[in-house]
Image (spheres, rainbow, N blue to C red):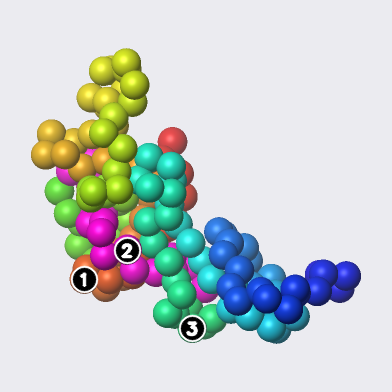
């Protein structure tokens, strides 16, 4: 980080999963907010942002964008209680419609009621608010 200096027009740096000490140092050295983002190409690239959260909430990916609905579910696609880990599922107008010519992958990836299975593990920490990504499903 010592040799890296921010450009004068740098307003924001988006990153994913950097350790807290790196985020704090980058925030100080770059002179602009360094925020967490979470998403994937299938869901319109970025699904959540932490732009509104303070640095003391590192590891929380933030609120879903208003055009997406995000849930944390168990193996039977039921919502899990707050504080319980489950799979992140999403739906909304920015979602892809399916994998091209791959009906088996589409059946595996979409729930029966149209939610996309991200394969990511998450924990809901507040109702309909911020999500914390834990890890990839194995």
On screen, 128 above or below 97? below
User: From the viewer's perspective, is 11 left or right of 81?
Assistant: right
On screen, 67 above or below 24? above
Residue 83 lies in the magenta-colored region: no
Q: Quadrant of the N terminus?
A: bottom right
Q: Position of residue 89 (x, y in %)?
A: 27, 47
Q: Nearer the viewer, mark 2 or mark 3?
A: 2
- Give the labeled residue for mark 3: 54
Q: In the current view of this chain or complex, which residue is farthest to the right?
A: 3
**Distance of label 1 from label 2 (alpha carbons):** 15 Å
Q: Residue at x 28, y 17 (%)?
A: 104
Helix, strand or loop at mark 1: loop
Q: Quadrant of residue 131?
A: bottom left
Q: In the current view of this chain or complex, which residue is farthest to the left?
A: 113
Q: Residue at x 49, y 83 (%)?
A: 54
User: From the viewer's perspective, is 132 left or right of 68?
Assistant: right
State the mark number for residue 87.
none
Most frequent secondary structure within the magenta stretch: loop
- Give the labeled residue for mark 2: 65
Labels 2 & 3 near each other (Cβ < 8 A): no
Q: Quadrant of the C terminus?
A: top left
Q: Position of residue 137 (x, y in %)?
A: 41, 40
Helix, strand or loop at mark 2: loop
**Distance of label 1 from label 3 (alpha carbons):** 19 Å
Q: Tell me which label, 2 or 3, sits earlier in the chain.
A: 3
- Few, some or many residues within 10 Å of mark 2 (<14, 14–19, 20+): few
State the mark number for residue 127.
1
What span is in magenta? Answer: 58-77
Q: Tell me which label, 1 or 3, sits earlier in the chain.
A: 3
């Amino acid at each position: 980080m010592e040799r890296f200096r921010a450009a004068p027009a740098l307003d924001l740096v988006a990153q994913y999963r950097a350790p807290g000490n790196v985020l704090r140092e980058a925030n100080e050295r770059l002179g602009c907010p360094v925020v967490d983002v979470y998403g994937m190409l299938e869901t319109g690239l970025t699904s959540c942002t932490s732009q509104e959260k303070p640095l003391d909430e590192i590891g929380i990916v933030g609120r879903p964008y208003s055009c997406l609905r995000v849930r944390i579910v168990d193996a039977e696609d039921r919502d899990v209680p707050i504080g319980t880990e489950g799979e992140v599922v999403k739906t909304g107008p920015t979602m892809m419609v399916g994998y091209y010519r791959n009906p088996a992958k589409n059946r595996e990836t979409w729930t029966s009621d149209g939610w996309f299975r991200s394969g990511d593990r998450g924990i809901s920490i507040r109702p309909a608010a911020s999500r914390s990504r834990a890890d990839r499903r194995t």
